[in-house]
Image (cartoon, helix red, strand yellow):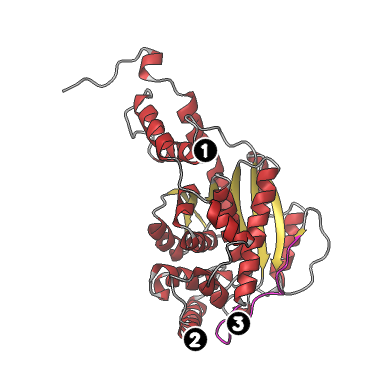
Amino acid sequence: MVINPDSLLGTTLASITPTNAEALAQAQERQNQLTKPPGSLGLLEVIGCQLSAITGEVPPPVPSHPVLAVFAADHGIFDQQITPWPQEVTVQMLINMCHGGASINALAPETGTEIWPIDIGIANGVPNAPSLRRRRVRNGTADFTQQPAMSLDEAQQALEVGIALADEAVAGGADVLLTGEVGLGNTTSAAALIAVLTGTDPELTTGRGSGSDEAMLNRKVDVIRRGLALHHPTADDPVGALAALGGLELAGMAGFMLGGAAHRVPVILDGVLSCASALIAAGLDPDVTGYLIAGHLGDEPGIRVALDKLGLPALCDLELRLGEGSGALMALSIVRASARVLRDMATFAEAGVSGKMDE
């Protein structure tokens, strides 16, 4: 797909730059001077240095205003019996979030995270609810075993919904963005996209999602194979792959990541859906990867495949498989700790502690 440089997507891509290599080197040097053996704090050191590279500051500021955007959408492949849950659960869970009853509502107060529930493509009507943002591109996607999930224009529109929301969040003071989603059938689209964008067999990217049994898992793999055979999506056309396979919430999260990178703000990924979206974003501009932090590993095999391709280490593995942004919320405290280590630990010289003896 040729992207109009004057579109919101085009101007956003043009404004994304690599993270700051000089700040990264300075942060790594400071890490080596702190009162600990170099490398002894593992990923806390890696993420602290990444935050400096993102912000251009050494030490980096501790993220204090997090926003979690939860994109909700439905999928036409639901009709292929790839989930044991009724499609009504998508809208029911979104409304539950709006009223404060979801897992992320329980977890968010620990970090002071603001939650934005977003209808980007639910198939049916959504009642009014507190904090609900209506940004619907279309009423769910089409069944990708029969036709493209959406048009190229709709895929770009959904990406731009995510970009506009990132712009809004940063304008309101957000200094770290978190990604989340709700959508029955969405792990099938995610597994399909990860297969395409990493060149991996769908059997290795497809998991059980929300409770599929062995027969349903096999059906999911078959559905993906049929979709790939019908559309022939390729990694060098991420928007085309997105349009062919869905979904709208995946596009929204990818746009949210692009917007975060354009504003030089870190973005924390959640589970397999976020990882699929990260591959889309990185396919549009590889420099986006430097702004992404992988929140966690989970039971879905596609997470590991996607993160290996992106070269991102996961911060924790709590055996999560819920989505919604739950894993990103759990990782946020680790991200903040990484910044505090680089900011608040004393150097050997400051503490009067002897460094390692020369051999």
> Which tag, 2 or 1, sits closer to the chain's start?
1
> Which of the labelled discs sits on residue 55, or is there none?
1
State which quarter of the image contains the C terminus.
Answer: top left
Question: SS class of the residue under badge 3?
Answer: loop
Q: Is residue 153 left or right of residue 49?
A: right
Magenta highlight range: 134-149
> Which tag, 2 or 3, sits closer to the chain's start?
3
The percent coordinates of residue 57 (x first, y second) are 50, 32
> Which tag, 3 or 1, sits closer to the chain's start?
1
Q: Is residue 259 left or right of residue 49?
A: right
Q: Residues within 10 Å of mark 3 (few under 14, many from 20)?
A: many
**Most distant residue in the front direction:** 6
- Nearest the camera: 28 or 81? 28
Quadrant position of residue 135: bottom right
The percent coordinates of residue 17 (x first, y second) are 49, 48
> Which of the labelled discs sits on residue 230, or is there none?
2
> Which of the labelled discs sits on residue 143, or is there none?
3
Give above or below for 35 relative to 75.
Answer: above
